[in-house]
Image (tube, helix red, strand yellow):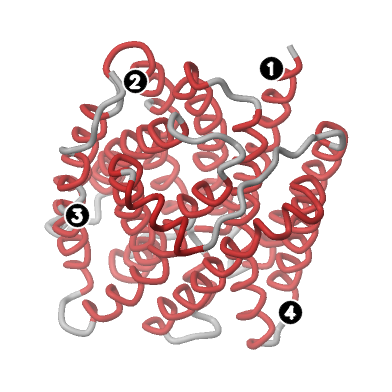
Amino acid sequence: MQKKKLRFILYILTFLFSMQVAIPTYINSSFLELHLPEKAIGFLYTIASLFTILSLLTIPVLLRKIGNFATTLFLVTINIAVALILAFSPNTYLVLSAFILLLVVHTTIGFNLDIFLEKQTDDRNTGNIRGIYMTIANMAWVISPALAGLLLTNGDYWKIYLISSLILLPFLILFSIGFKSFKDPIYNKTLFCKTFRKIHENKNIFKIFMVRSFLQFFYSWMVIYTPIYLHKYIGFEWKMIGIIFTIMLLPFILFELPMGILADKKYGEKEILNLGIVILVISTISLSFINSSLFLIWAGVLFATRIGASFIEIMAESYFFKHVEEKDIDVISFFRMTRPIAYSVGPLIASFVLFFLDYRYIFLVLGVIMLLALRYSLTIEDTK
C-alpha cells in the first residue's frame, strides 16, 4: 500500500517536473539566437551535455554522502534559480552559463526520480508502471508547446522561463512531504571503466543502451533544429508551431502505456521496438521532401515520427528497468547518460551537415542514421 501511495506522489511530481522542463524546450534554440549565431547553438548544447555527463558520473558520490532526498532538493533549488536568471538577466555570458546549468540539472533530477520510482517498482509490472509514469510525464510535454506558443508574443521569452521556475514551487512542497523519510538503498560503488565493462559484457543491456542512444540522438536534432526550421524557413508563427508540437507529441500519451502493458503481458519488447524504429525512419526521411507549408501535413508527419519514438522510448525503458535494481545507480547513471552523450555528439554532427547540405536535408540524414539502430534491436534477447 505504501508503494502505491508513493508511486502516486511520484506521478504528480513527474508531471510538474516534466511541465517545467517541457515549456521552454522547443523555444530554447530560438531564445539562444538572441545571444548566439544560429550555427553556434549546437556547440552550446554540446558544452552543456559534456557537463551533464560529468554530473552523472559524480552524482553517485553525492547520493552516498547525503542521500537522494537531499540531493534532489538541492538540484531543484538550483533549477529554480537558473530559470529566473534566464527570465530576467540581460547579460549574455550569465544567460549562456545559466542555460548550460539548466540542462545539467534537468537530466540529473530525472536520474534522481528514477531511483525513487525504481524503489517502488516490482519487475513483473515494470512495463505497466513505467508506462503510467511516462504517459503522465508526456501529458505535460503535450500541453507545454501550445502553452508556450500562447505565451510567446512579441518575443516575450522571459514569461516562459518565469513560469517554468514557478512550477517547481509546488513540486518542492509535495516532494518534501512525500519523501522526507525515504530510505536510500546501499548504492553500488563502481568506477567508470568497471561500469562500462559491466554494461558491455551484458550484451542485452549494451544493445538497449545503444538503441536509447540513437533515440536521444534523434531528439537532439529534432528539439534544436525543427523549431528553427518551422519558424524561420517554413514561416509558421509561434502560436501555430505550439499547436503543431502539441499534436506531434500526442503519441507519447496514446501509445506508451498500452505498449508497456503489451510488453509485460504478451509480446515482450523486441517486436514493438523494431516496429517503432521502422516507423520513425520512414517518417523522418519524408520530412525532407515536404514542399508545402500546410499545417495539417507538417502536424501529421511529425505525429508519425513520434509514434515511432514513443514505441522505442517505452520499450527501452521497460527492457532496461527489468534488468536493474535501484541499488544499481552506476548502471542507471550510464543509461541516463545516453541523453547528454547524444546531445554532445548530435549537434556537432548536425552543424557539420549544415555546412554542406540545405537545411531541409537534415531530416534525411537523421533518418538514415536512425536506421543503424536496427543493428542492435534486431538481435536483442526478448523478455517473452
Q: Tell me the amino acid under the disc marked 3.
A: Leu
Which residue matches tag 3? 287
Which residue matches tag 4? 89
Q: Classify the position of the N terminus by image quarter.
A: top right
The image quadrant of residue 88 is bottom right
| Residue 312 to residue 85: above or below | above
Of tags 1 and 4, which is closer to the observer? 1
Of tags 2 and 4, which is closer to the observer? 2
Secondary structure, mark 4, is loop
Q: CA distance from mark 2 to mark 1?
A: 21 Å
Which residue matches tag 1? 4
Q: Earlier in the sequence, mark 1 or mark 4?
A: 1
Secondary structure, mark 3, is helix
Residues 166 and 372: in front is: 372
Q: Earlier in the sequence, mark 1 or mark 3?
A: 1
Q: Is residue 152 left or right of residue 304?
A: right
Q: Position of residue 44 (x, y in %)?
A: 48, 79
Q: Tell me the amino acid under the disc marked 1.
A: Lys
Q: CA distance from mark 3 to mark 4?
A: 37 Å
Q: Tell me the amino acid under the disc marked 4.
A: Ser
Q: CA distance from mark 2 to mark 3?
A: 30 Å
Which residue matches tag 2? 263
Q: Is residue 12 left or right of residue 337?
A: right
Q: Is residue 33 left or right of residue 94?
A: left
- Say few, some or many: other residues with alpha carbon within 10 Å of mark 4 (under 14 / 14 to 19 / 20 or more): some
